[in-house]
Image: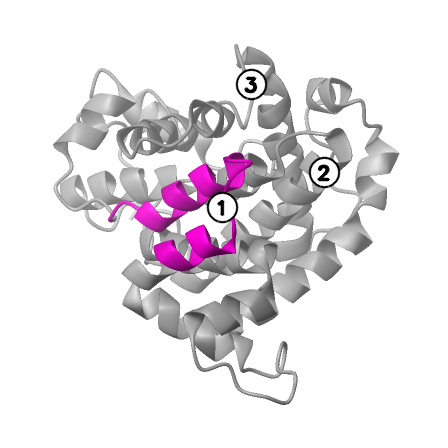
Amino acid sequence: MAAPASLNRFATPEDLVSQLKSLPPSPRVVLKLQQLAASDSSDVGDLVAVIRIERALAARIVRISNGPLYSLGSRCESIEESVHRLGFREVRRIATVVAGSEALAQPLPSYGIAPAALWHQAVACAVAAEYLARLASEDEHQAYTAGLMHGVGMVVINTWVQSISPGTVLGYHNAATEWTEAERDLLGYDLADAGAALLRTWDFPAAVVEAVRCQYAPQVASNHRRLAAVLNCARWLRTVVCQHETPSLPAPEKLALLTLRLSEQQLRDCLPEVLAEINSARQVLNAA
Protein backbone atom coordinates (compact mmCIF):
# COMPACT_ATOMS: atom_id res chain seq x y z
CA MET A 1 0.00 0.00 0.00
CA ALA A 2 1.35 3.41 -0.95
CA ALA A 3 1.71 6.05 1.72
CA PRO A 4 -1.41 8.16 2.31
CA ALA A 5 -1.23 11.91 1.81
CA SER A 6 -0.85 12.47 5.55
CA LEU A 7 -1.15 10.77 8.90
CA ASN A 8 -2.10 12.14 12.29
CA ARG A 9 0.73 14.57 13.03
CA PHE A 10 2.42 15.30 16.32
CA ALA A 11 3.82 18.75 17.00
CA THR A 12 7.31 17.40 17.67
CA PRO A 13 9.25 14.14 17.35
CA GLU A 14 9.33 14.06 21.16
CA ASP A 15 5.53 14.02 21.16
CA LEU A 16 5.58 11.05 18.80
CA VAL A 17 8.05 9.12 20.95
CA SER A 18 6.04 9.81 24.09
CA GLN A 19 2.85 8.46 22.49
CA LEU A 20 4.23 5.16 21.29
CA LYS A 21 3.56 2.11 23.45
CA SER A 22 5.93 -0.44 21.88
CA LEU A 23 9.29 1.24 21.51
CA PRO A 24 12.47 -0.87 21.54
CA PRO A 25 14.13 -1.36 24.94
CA SER A 26 16.81 1.08 25.97
CA PRO A 27 20.27 -0.40 25.20
CA ARG A 28 21.62 0.21 28.72
CA VAL A 29 24.89 -1.53 28.02
CA VAL A 30 25.64 0.88 25.16
CA LEU A 31 25.23 3.83 27.50
CA LYS A 32 27.46 2.30 30.16
CA LEU A 33 30.11 1.48 27.58
CA GLN A 34 29.99 5.09 26.40
CA GLN A 35 30.74 6.22 29.94
CA LEU A 36 33.61 3.76 30.30
CA ALA A 37 35.10 4.74 26.95
CA ALA A 38 35.00 8.42 27.93
CA SER A 39 36.70 7.83 31.29
CA ASP A 40 40.47 7.86 31.58
CA SER A 41 40.26 5.86 34.80
CA SER A 42 38.22 2.90 33.48
CA ASP A 43 39.91 -0.44 32.94
CA VAL A 44 39.16 -4.03 31.95
CA GLY A 45 37.73 -4.73 35.40
CA ASP A 46 35.07 -2.07 34.87
CA LEU A 47 34.19 -3.65 31.54
CA VAL A 48 33.87 -7.09 33.13
CA ALA A 49 31.56 -5.66 35.80
CA VAL A 50 29.19 -4.32 33.13
CA ILE A 51 29.18 -7.52 31.09
CA ARG A 52 28.46 -9.66 34.17
CA ILE A 53 25.10 -7.92 34.57
CA GLU A 54 23.93 -9.03 31.12
CA ARG A 55 23.93 -12.84 31.12
CA ALA A 56 23.22 -13.26 27.42
CA LEU A 57 25.98 -10.81 26.53
CA ALA A 58 28.45 -12.51 28.87
CA ALA A 59 27.76 -15.88 27.26
CA ARG A 60 28.32 -14.44 23.80
CA ILE A 61 31.59 -12.80 24.79
CA VAL A 62 32.93 -16.10 26.13
CA ARG A 63 31.71 -17.98 23.05
CA ILE A 64 33.32 -15.51 20.66
CA SER A 65 36.64 -15.59 22.55
CA ASN A 66 36.69 -19.37 22.08
CA GLY A 67 35.71 -19.20 18.42
CA PRO A 68 37.93 -19.51 15.35
CA LEU A 69 38.46 -15.75 15.05
CA TYR A 70 40.17 -15.41 18.43
CA SER A 71 40.97 -18.89 19.76
CA LEU A 72 44.61 -19.39 20.77
CA GLY A 73 44.39 -23.12 21.29
CA SER A 74 43.15 -22.92 24.87
CA ARG A 75 39.65 -22.30 26.14
CA CYS A 76 38.54 -19.28 28.11
CA GLU A 77 36.44 -20.41 31.04
CA SER A 78 35.47 -17.03 32.48
CA ILE A 79 34.39 -13.56 31.42
CA GLU A 80 37.66 -12.16 32.76
CA GLU A 81 39.75 -14.49 30.59
CA SER A 82 37.61 -13.72 27.56
CA VAL A 83 37.88 -9.96 28.03
CA HIS A 84 41.66 -10.15 28.44
CA ARG A 85 41.94 -12.27 25.29
CA LEU A 86 39.77 -10.00 23.17
CA GLY A 87 40.98 -6.68 24.55
CA PHE A 88 39.07 -3.63 25.77
CA ARG A 89 38.40 -2.14 22.32
CA GLU A 90 37.13 -5.35 20.74
CA VAL A 91 34.93 -6.27 23.71
CA ARG A 92 33.45 -2.79 23.71
CA ARG A 93 32.69 -3.16 19.99
CA ILE A 94 31.12 -6.61 20.41
CA ALA A 95 29.10 -5.59 23.44
CA THR A 96 27.80 -2.47 21.68
CA VAL A 97 26.82 -4.51 18.63
CA VAL A 98 25.02 -7.15 20.66
CA ALA A 99 23.22 -4.63 22.88
CA GLY A 100 22.26 -2.37 19.99
CA SER A 101 20.81 -5.25 17.98
CA GLU A 102 17.93 -5.48 20.45
CA ALA A 103 16.82 -2.01 19.43
CA LEU A 104 17.31 -2.35 15.69
CA ALA A 105 16.91 -5.97 14.62
CA GLN A 106 13.21 -5.91 13.77
CA PRO A 107 11.15 -5.81 10.57
CA LEU A 108 10.29 -2.41 9.12
CA PRO A 109 7.47 -2.93 6.61
CA SER A 110 7.00 0.82 6.12
CA TYR A 111 10.54 0.90 4.70
CA GLY A 112 10.59 -2.51 3.04
CA ILE A 113 13.71 -3.46 4.99
CA ALA A 114 14.39 -6.83 6.61
CA PRO A 115 15.85 -6.86 10.16
CA ALA A 116 19.15 -8.34 9.01
CA ALA A 117 19.59 -5.66 6.33
CA LEU A 118 18.87 -2.83 8.77
CA TRP A 119 21.30 -4.24 11.31
CA HIS A 120 24.09 -4.77 8.78
CA GLN A 121 23.64 -1.18 7.61
CA ALA A 122 23.87 0.01 11.21
CA VAL A 123 27.10 -1.91 11.83
CA ALA A 124 28.59 -0.75 8.53
CA CYS A 125 27.79 2.88 9.35
CA ALA A 126 29.25 2.49 12.84
CA VAL A 127 32.51 1.07 11.54
CA ALA A 128 32.74 3.72 8.83
CA ALA A 129 32.05 6.51 11.35
CA GLU A 130 34.70 5.16 13.72
CA TYR A 131 37.24 5.05 10.89
CA LEU A 132 36.44 8.60 9.73
CA ALA A 133 36.52 9.92 13.29
CA ARG A 134 40.01 8.50 13.69
CA LEU A 135 41.01 10.20 10.44
CA ALA A 136 39.47 13.52 11.51
CA SER A 137 40.68 13.39 15.14
CA GLU A 138 37.14 13.16 16.48
CA ASP A 139 35.86 10.95 19.31
CA GLU A 140 35.84 7.41 17.89
CA HIS A 141 33.55 6.01 20.59
CA GLN A 142 30.84 8.61 20.03
CA ALA A 143 31.18 8.26 16.27
CA TYR A 144 30.77 4.49 16.46
CA THR A 145 27.67 4.82 18.64
CA ALA A 146 26.16 7.51 16.41
CA GLY A 147 26.74 5.30 13.38
CA LEU A 148 25.19 2.30 15.08
CA MET A 149 22.10 4.28 16.11
CA HIS A 150 21.75 6.51 13.04
CA GLY A 151 18.70 4.63 11.76
CA VAL A 152 16.84 4.08 15.03
CA GLY A 153 14.34 6.76 14.02
CA MET A 154 13.06 4.34 11.38
CA VAL A 155 11.92 2.06 14.19
CA VAL A 156 9.98 4.94 15.77
CA ILE A 157 8.30 6.05 12.55
CA ASN A 158 7.58 2.50 11.38
CA THR A 159 5.89 1.69 14.70
CA TRP A 160 3.60 4.69 14.40
CA VAL A 161 2.83 4.38 10.68
CA GLN A 162 1.94 0.68 10.93
CA SER A 163 -0.30 1.30 13.95
CA ILE A 164 -2.27 3.96 12.07
CA SER A 165 -2.13 2.68 8.51
CA PRO A 166 -0.95 -0.97 8.29
CA GLY A 167 0.67 -1.82 5.00
CA THR A 168 1.81 1.73 4.27
CA VAL A 169 5.15 1.87 2.47
CA LEU A 170 7.22 5.05 2.47
CA GLY A 171 8.82 6.13 -0.78
CA TYR A 172 12.61 6.04 -1.10
CA HIS A 173 13.93 9.09 -2.97
CA ASN A 174 17.69 8.72 -3.39
CA ALA A 175 20.85 7.82 -1.48
CA ALA A 176 21.30 11.38 -0.23
CA THR A 177 17.84 11.95 1.25
CA GLU A 178 16.60 8.33 1.50
CA TRP A 179 13.02 8.34 2.91
CA THR A 180 13.13 11.77 4.49
CA GLU A 181 10.85 13.50 1.96
CA ALA A 182 8.07 10.94 2.46
CA GLU A 183 8.52 11.08 6.23
CA ARG A 184 8.24 14.85 6.29
CA ASP A 185 5.15 14.74 4.09
CA LEU A 186 3.52 12.37 6.56
CA LEU A 187 4.70 13.69 9.89
CA GLY A 188 6.41 17.01 9.38
CA TYR A 189 9.83 15.62 10.40
CA ASP A 190 12.05 12.71 9.48
CA LEU A 191 13.87 9.67 10.86
CA ALA A 192 16.82 11.80 11.98
CA ASP A 193 14.53 13.94 14.16
CA ALA A 194 12.67 10.90 15.50
CA GLY A 195 15.89 9.03 16.21
CA ALA A 196 17.37 11.97 18.09
CA ALA A 197 14.20 12.25 20.18
CA LEU A 198 14.40 8.58 21.14
CA LEU A 199 18.12 8.75 21.96
CA ARG A 200 17.46 11.80 24.11
CA THR A 201 14.79 9.83 25.98
CA TRP A 202 17.36 7.08 26.49
CA ASP A 203 19.85 9.65 27.90
CA PHE A 204 22.45 9.22 25.17
CA PRO A 205 25.26 11.83 25.12
CA ALA A 206 24.30 15.18 23.60
CA ALA A 207 26.98 14.82 20.93
CA VAL A 208 25.53 11.53 19.70
CA VAL A 209 21.98 12.91 19.77
CA GLU A 210 22.90 15.96 17.73
CA ALA A 211 24.97 13.99 15.23
CA VAL A 212 22.00 11.69 14.57
CA ARG A 213 19.60 14.64 14.31
CA CYS A 214 21.84 16.46 11.82
CA GLN A 215 23.08 13.46 9.83
CA TYR A 216 21.45 14.72 6.60
CA ALA A 217 22.48 18.36 7.11
CA PRO A 218 25.60 18.64 9.31
CA GLN A 219 25.79 22.37 8.71
CA VAL A 220 22.76 22.98 10.95
CA ALA A 221 24.40 21.37 13.98
CA SER A 222 25.13 23.92 16.67
CA ASN A 223 27.67 22.24 18.98
CA HIS A 224 28.79 19.01 17.33
CA ARG A 225 29.07 19.85 13.65
CA ARG A 226 32.18 17.76 13.03
CA LEU A 227 30.64 14.63 14.50
CA ALA A 228 27.51 15.19 12.40
CA ALA A 229 29.76 15.58 9.35
CA VAL A 230 31.49 12.30 10.23
CA LEU A 231 28.10 10.58 10.34
CA ASN A 232 27.01 12.15 7.05
CA CYS A 233 30.13 10.84 5.30
CA ALA A 234 29.85 7.47 7.05
CA ARG A 235 26.34 7.07 5.63
CA TRP A 236 27.82 7.51 2.16
CA LEU A 237 30.39 4.79 2.79
CA ARG A 238 27.65 2.57 4.26
CA THR A 239 25.52 3.02 1.14
CA VAL A 240 28.35 2.13 -1.21
CA VAL A 241 29.18 -1.00 0.77
CA CYS A 242 25.73 -2.30 1.73
CA GLN A 243 23.74 -1.38 -1.35
CA HIS A 244 26.54 -2.34 -3.72
CA GLU A 245 26.55 1.12 -5.23
CA THR A 246 29.54 2.00 -7.35
CA PRO A 247 32.06 4.51 -6.04
CA SER A 248 30.57 6.89 -8.65
CA LEU A 249 27.67 7.49 -6.25
CA PRO A 250 27.38 11.27 -5.70
CA ALA A 251 29.56 12.32 -2.78
CA PRO A 252 28.17 13.50 0.57
CA GLU A 253 27.39 17.12 1.36
CA LYS A 254 30.32 19.31 0.28
CA LEU A 255 30.05 21.20 3.55
CA ALA A 256 30.48 17.91 5.43
CA LEU A 257 33.71 17.21 3.57
CA LEU A 258 34.92 20.76 4.13
CA THR A 259 34.11 20.51 7.84
CA LEU A 260 36.30 17.41 8.11
CA ARG A 261 38.94 18.87 5.78
CA LEU A 262 38.58 15.87 3.50
CA SER A 263 38.45 15.87 -0.28
CA GLU A 264 35.99 13.73 -2.20
CA GLN A 265 38.91 11.64 -3.45
CA GLN A 266 40.19 11.07 0.09
CA LEU A 267 36.77 9.80 1.08
CA ARG A 268 36.66 7.43 -1.88
CA ASP A 269 40.18 6.25 -1.02
CA CYS A 270 38.84 5.17 2.39
CA LEU A 271 36.58 2.55 0.83
CA PRO A 272 38.98 -0.46 0.77
CA GLU A 273 40.05 -0.07 4.40
CA VAL A 274 36.52 0.64 5.61
CA LEU A 275 35.21 -2.37 3.69
CA ALA A 276 37.87 -4.57 5.29
CA GLU A 277 36.87 -3.33 8.77
CA ILE A 278 33.18 -3.83 8.01
CA ASN A 279 33.81 -7.40 6.86
CA SER A 280 35.75 -8.05 10.06
CA ALA A 281 32.88 -6.64 12.12
CA ARG A 282 30.38 -8.79 10.24
CA GLN A 283 32.39 -11.88 11.10
CA VAL A 284 32.11 -10.93 14.74
CA LEU A 285 28.40 -10.21 14.30
CA ASN A 286 27.81 -13.61 12.74
CA ALA A 287 29.77 -15.27 15.54
CA ALA A 288 27.70 -13.43 18.12
- The answer to whether one can see residue 118 in this image is no
| Inter-mark Cα distance, 2 to 1 | 16 Å
Residue 115 is left or right of residue 19, and the answer is right
What percent of the width, then of the height, locates residue 69? 63, 77
Identify the element where label 3 is drawn: loop
Other residues around mark 3 within 10 Å, as few (<14) / some (14–19) / many (≥20): some
In this rendering, the answer to whether 84 lies above or below 104 is below
Q: Find out whether residue 28 is within the magenta segment.
A: yes
Q: Nearer the viewer, residue 49 or 1?
A: 49
Other residues around mark 1 within 10 Å, as few (<14) / some (14–19) / many (≥20): many
* Residue bearing mark 1: 148
* Residue bearing mark 3: 224
- The answer to whether one can see residue 52 in this image is yes
Tag 3 or tag 1, which sits nearer the N-term?
A: 1
In this rendering, the answer to whether 36 lies above or below 258 is below
Q: Nearer the viewer, residue 199 or 23?
A: 199
> Looking at the image, do the residues carrying marks 2 and 3 touch, with CB atoms under 8 Å apart?
no
Tag 3 or tag 2, which sits nearer the N-term?
A: 2
What percent of the width, then of the height, locates residue 172? 48, 41
The structure residue drawn at horizontal position 56% and vertical position 40%, both measured from the top left corner, is 141
Q: Nearer the viewer, residue 76 or 26?
A: 76
Q: Which residues are magenta?
A: 25-50
Q: Give the label on residue 134, or none.
A: 2
What percent of the width, then of the height, locates residue 258? 77, 19
The structure residue drawn at horizontal position 74% and vertical position 30%, both measured from the top left corner, is 136
What percent of the width, then of the height, locates residue 195? 37, 33
| Inter-mark Cα distance, 1 to 3 | 17 Å
What type of secondary structure mainly makes up the magenta span?
A: helix
